[in-house]
Image (cartoon, rainbow, N blue to C red):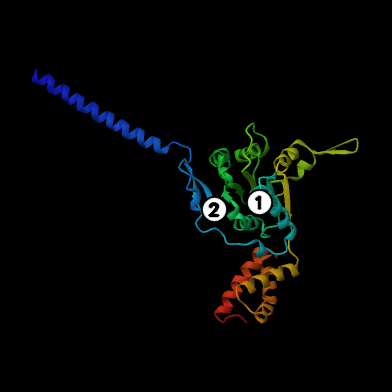
Amino acid sequence: MATRTKEKRIEMNDLVQLVTRAEQLIGRLEQLLPRPAAAPDWDAARAFLWRRRNGHASLVPVTRPHAIRLKDLRDIDDQKERIDLNTRQFLAGRRANNVLLTGARGTGKSSLVKALLNAYAGKGLRLIEVDRDDLMDLPEIIELVQGRPERFILFCDDLSFEDAEPAYKALKSVLDGSVAAVPDNVLIYATSNRRHLMPEYHDENLQTQHVDGEIHPGEAVEEKISLSERFGLWISFYPFSQDEYLEIVAYWLKSFGLERKAIDAARQEALQWALMRGSRSGRVAWQFARDWAGRFETGNAR
């Protein structure tokens, strides 16, 4: 009898250990399974980064957002006016469009979006930056912000796709293709060096047909256009002229505290800097100004 009782006790202990190990294993598996993102502390920041790591997504507060101002962006007054008006309509609760900013690199596309946040954060504007690889999560992000009193811009920077990418279809659906409507407190602003966000090939143009004097693009071209045209507002950016480039250089050098004489002395080196970089963009002008101002502060500028 004692032997049987001992055997039952051993079996019971083994069963308890097995159940305990099973519970521990289930707990570890639950940590690996995707789960809905929790709402962040909305008062912690005015800008957030959407990040998905190991299947877990979250909105990460940006504690030090870029301090660029609208007045710092030079020689793109028309572009500023158009997107500024659209953003003010959005903040006022009126109708506004999703925006696609395309064109030459370094001309201020992404900086313009960041400057809008700095200008209107006090009026309830918030920015959520979403990487291209995370665009599949757009519906989840929209669900998090729906019903909030703030107005959210979902920002996709330097956006481009290859053929048949899932993220392409996800963005297309959210813009204008899903049964579920995007809430009124959400807009999508995207920047790209490609007008239609996808590579375009010469042989696709050969598919174009001429019918009764009208041009009918091929299916491949139509598919690529179908995403970009879902943005209600297109804003194009163009390379700067030499005078515009030098004006931007002078603006930044002045903002860095240099006097007119030192700014004038930088002209020739600013042109050489742009020649070496192969671009007269606002970004190149800002980079040169930082370099020149740094050398001037240490007494190394000629």
Give the vertical position of 274 relative to 115 (above or below). Answer: below
Are discs 2 and 1 less than 8 Å apart at CB? no
Residue depicted at 47% across the width and 48% down the height: 41
Answer with left or right where residue 71 lies relative to residue 140: right
Rendered position, 45 above or below 164: below
Residue 53, given in percent of the width and then of the height, sits at: 47, 45
In this picture, residue 295 sits left or right of residue 104: left
Residue picked out by circle 2:
46
Is 145 or 128 nearer to us in this picture? 145
| Residue 206 x %, y % | 80, 41
Mark 1 Cα shell of 10 Å, populated few (<14), some (14-19), many (≥20): many
Q: Secondary structure at mark 1?
A: strand
Q: Quadrant of the N terminus?
A: top left
Q: Position of residue 151 (x, y in %)?
A: 60, 47
Amino acid type of disc 2? Arg
**Residue situated furthest right in the rendering:** 212
Q: Front-most of 144 and 205? A: 144
Nearer mark to the viewer, of 2 and 1: 2
| Residue 31 appears anywhere in the view | yes
Q: Quadrant of residue 16?
A: top left
Q: Could you say whether the residue bearing mark 2 is in a helix, strand or loop?
A: loop
Measured as percent of width and height from the top left, residue 252 is found at 64, 70
Residue tagged 1: 191
Where 77 sits versus 233, above or below?
below
- The residue depicted at 67 percent of the width and 71 percent of the height is 251
